[in-house]
Amino acid sequence: MNRSWPMELRDTREQRRKTRGATSASADPSALAIMLGLVAALARSVPWFQVSLGMTVAFLAAMMPWAVGQALTVMDRDFTAIHIEGELQRMEQSELLDALEPLLGQSYFASNLSRVKEQVEALPWVQSAAVSREWPGTLNVDVIEHHPVAYWNGQALLNRDGEVFKPANAQVRGIPALAGPRGSEQEVLRQARAFAGTLGEYDLRLASLELEPRGAWTLHLDNGINVALGRDRTEERFQRFLAVYESQLAPVAASVERVDARYGNGVAVRWRDTGSVADSGDHNQG
């Protein structure tokens, strides 16, 4: 026996047409949502601590010149005192103070110490100077004087370093007179020291030393004897003169006017009284 079951037929075609190919609203974000998401991700990746630290440093660096300027303005004072240091033998401290007096009342920070140094070193007897500030209002000046060791070309003096200087009062006792072409100051001073050291062993004293433009050397001793050494083999000729002086000329030195050591193996002596020349050895001037 066949049984029939009740069946219900429904038309679902319309429903299938509505849902075919459709997606949910959450799966289709807008452009704005995408942009906001990117911004949020970028914000999370930025090292905000380092950024803020960098901005703070940049701000402080920009403000530093202004802050320093304001601090200097508040701390600035005028110079009210000048303190001079150094052993002064040739010049008076008052001479230095007169040269520096215009600095009193000038700004502590704004004053140019390099110019002050140049101003002090321009004084004839000053070899070098060190200038410094001492807050709140003192200018310190440390001076080293020229120490004269020789006259130079009859118009100036030489210091221990072979530097030429020309003070107004160039009268110095007990120093030799040196002469030579421009630029030869240190060479002549060096040679004079060498000659003077050796002459002292023979109880002789250097009065002057001259280097001629052509390179010839001439010694003048304090006993009045002139010694011509020439250009070549100067040390050898100098030693020859000393040997002859010690062995023959010392007892009659007062009568000797000139000794010419420009010989190969001897010297020529000119006497004061007669003006005659005693010639010894092969003459080989140069």
Image (cartoon, rainbow, N blue to C red):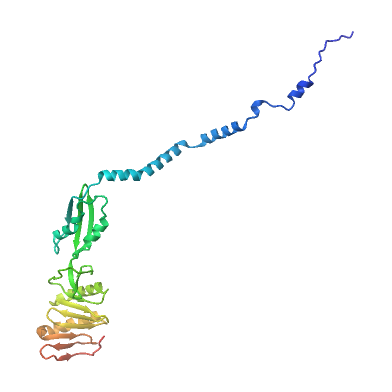
Q: Quarter-wise, where is residue 141 in the image? A: bottom left
Observer able to see residue 225: yes
Quadrant where the N terminus sits is: top right
| Whether residue 203 is situated above or below residue 282 in the rendered picture | above
| Whether residue 197 is situated above or below residue 266 in the rendered picture | above
Q: Nearer the viewer, residue 198 or 255?
A: 255
- Picture coordinates of residue 29 (x, y %)? 63, 30
- Picture coordinates of residue 48 (x, y %)? 46, 36
Q: Residue at x 79, y 21 (%)?
A: 13
Observer able to see residue 248: no
Q: Quarter-wise, where is residue 245 in the image? A: bottom left
Quadrant where the C terminus sits is: bottom left
Q: Residue at x 40, y 39 (%)?
A: 56
Q: Residue at x 27, y 57 (%)?
A: 114
- Picture coordinates of residue 200 (x, y %)? 15, 75
Q: Nearer the viewer, residue 208 or 146?
A: 146
